[in-house]
Image: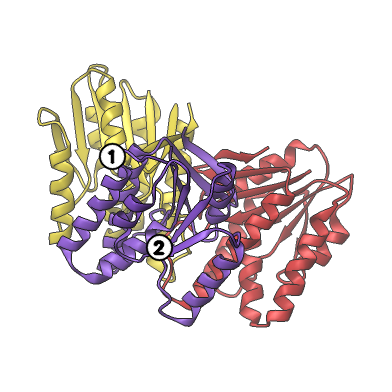
Chain colours: A red, B yellow, C purple
């Protein structure tokens, strides 16, 4: 069972994803993609950490997400990835087109026939004005295309607004 | 009955909220939070004014919204607040962390056990690219967290797109 | 039958609109509104072209969309316009208020009593932070008001997220 949970900034998507993970009544492996590059980011990461149950297994991976997912997905565990948008942003910042394509494909491959439950969290970023800087537009494009590809693979897709899920696919 | 109506810029959320207020067949107290700081804002305010029924009681309050709400909510009246986003923005511009926390709590308290119908309008601002200036990010965070807190309290939550409501909670 | 398909950047709205057009089992007239002003735009246009069936009739019109629609709508053809946001942006760049009002009205008139199926694609741009430049705000306003007016006329309205349609009206 693959689930994609989309939502804007501070939409409550992480909280909703954590609630969904808990419903499986299985051990949870939490994969964080955030890199703590500055004070604000460190604060956001620490806040997420406080929100999570203490007994969850936590991995941090900012680039090679596909490989870690492949190793993590298992029938007796829920894997929760939060969030894909930061991972995409990390990848784009490498400024290496081949690496980007490889890592993206590795993610889609890891999810192609998963042997256990996976929950993916990602930011909806495309419903504002098209940004006037080229890197931001590239980010919006990469995010939107990834969401489309994942939404095809996933059995369940929601958009969270104000903490409340709208079902897009189920 | 507490209702939260979210929507993007020019989504028709105010018009929808006014229609909802009218359905109660009670006198309406309209609370505007906009401050007329420049010509563009004055125009937006005047347009909203033209859209409203003339016989509605109108209050303007840009900061102490919780106190006004507490005095306003009554069984024989519908209170309509438009909009929370501007109020949050006014509060953040004070740059006074304690005042912010106080006023935010006063709002949540006023809504905790309301003695009459309240309709709250607010902007969805978190579904675009994360802004690159820190104040805008703070605004997006504050808005998203407020929406989550209010959505828990409210019996009814909608997202308006192109004038059409999507029900998030009812 | 008039259908409005909204969605953010890279939301899959064009692909969904093309699938909807194909369902009619009628010849399709595709109206593109994009102007190829720079390399990036040329790439986006070319990508859209590759996605489209080769046998579709293609028209390009960046300004006088209402007149072309009036001539195009017919019982034995589906007309697909992609997208209104670029057309609005082209219009605003003319910086001619009268022309803007005329062309906008011509569009609404062409759709008032259409003699055949029309599918309109447009970008949701109002769910991010209000932009700090006046032209971008004007664009967000014009887009939101147009969506509201069209959503009233159309029999069917959807919001596409991650390639999946949410029905707003049907």
Could you say where residue A21 lies in the image, as x and y percent from the top left?
73, 43
Give the label on residue B14, or none: 1
Q: Is residue C122 above or below residue A88?
A: above
Could you say where residue B42 lies in the image, as x and y percent from the top left?
13, 54
Q: Is residue A10 above or below residue C158?
A: below
Could you say where residue C111 lies in the image, as x and y percent from the top left?
33, 44
> Which of the two residues, B102 or C46, is positioned nearer the viewer here?
C46
Q: Residue at x 54, y 66 (%)?
A: A140
* Protein chain holding label 2: A
* Protein chain holding label 1: B
> Which of the two residues, A157 or B156, is positioned nearer the viewer here?
A157
> Which of the two residues, A99 or C156, is positioned nearer the viewer here?
C156
Quarter location, residue A93: bottom right
A115 horizontally vs B141: left or right: right
Quadrant (top left, top right, bottom left, bottom right) of the C terminus of chain A: top right
Both labels 2 and 1 in a single chain: no
Q: Secondary structure at mark 1?
A: helix
Mark 2 to mark 1: distance in Å? 21 Å
Q: Residue at x 47, y 43 (%)?
A: C76
Quarter location, residue B54: top left
Give the label on residue A129, or none: 2
Q: Residue at x 77, y 70 (%)?
A: A64
Using the rendered image of the protein, determine whether residue A62 is visible from the camera's viewpoint.
yes
B153 horizontally vs A74: left or right: left
Counting other residues with Cα less than 10 Å from the Cα at mark 2, is it few (<14), some (14-19), or many (20 or more)?
A: many
């Amino acid at each position: 069972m693959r689930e994609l949970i989309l939502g804007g900034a501070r939409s409550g998507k992480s909280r909703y994803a954590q609630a969904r993970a808990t419903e499986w009544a299985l051990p949870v492996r939490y994969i964080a993609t955030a890199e703590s590059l500055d004070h604000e980011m460190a604060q956001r990461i620490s806040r997420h950490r406080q929100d999570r149950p203490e007994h969850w297994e936590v991995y941090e991976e900012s680039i090679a997400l596909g490989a870690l997912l492949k190793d993590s997905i298992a029938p007796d565990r829920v894997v929760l990835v939060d969030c894909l948008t930061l991972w995409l942003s990390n990848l784009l910042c490498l400024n290496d087109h081949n690496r980007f394509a490889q890592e993206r494909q590795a993610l889609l491959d890891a999810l192609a026939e998963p042997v256990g439950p996976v929950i993916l969290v990602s930011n909806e970023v495309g419903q504002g004005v098209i940004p006037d800087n080229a890197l931001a537009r590239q980010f919006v494009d990469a995010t939107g295309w990834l969401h489309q590809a994942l939404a095809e693979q996933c059995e369940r897709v929601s958009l969270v607004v104000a903490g409340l899920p709208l079902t897009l696919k189920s």
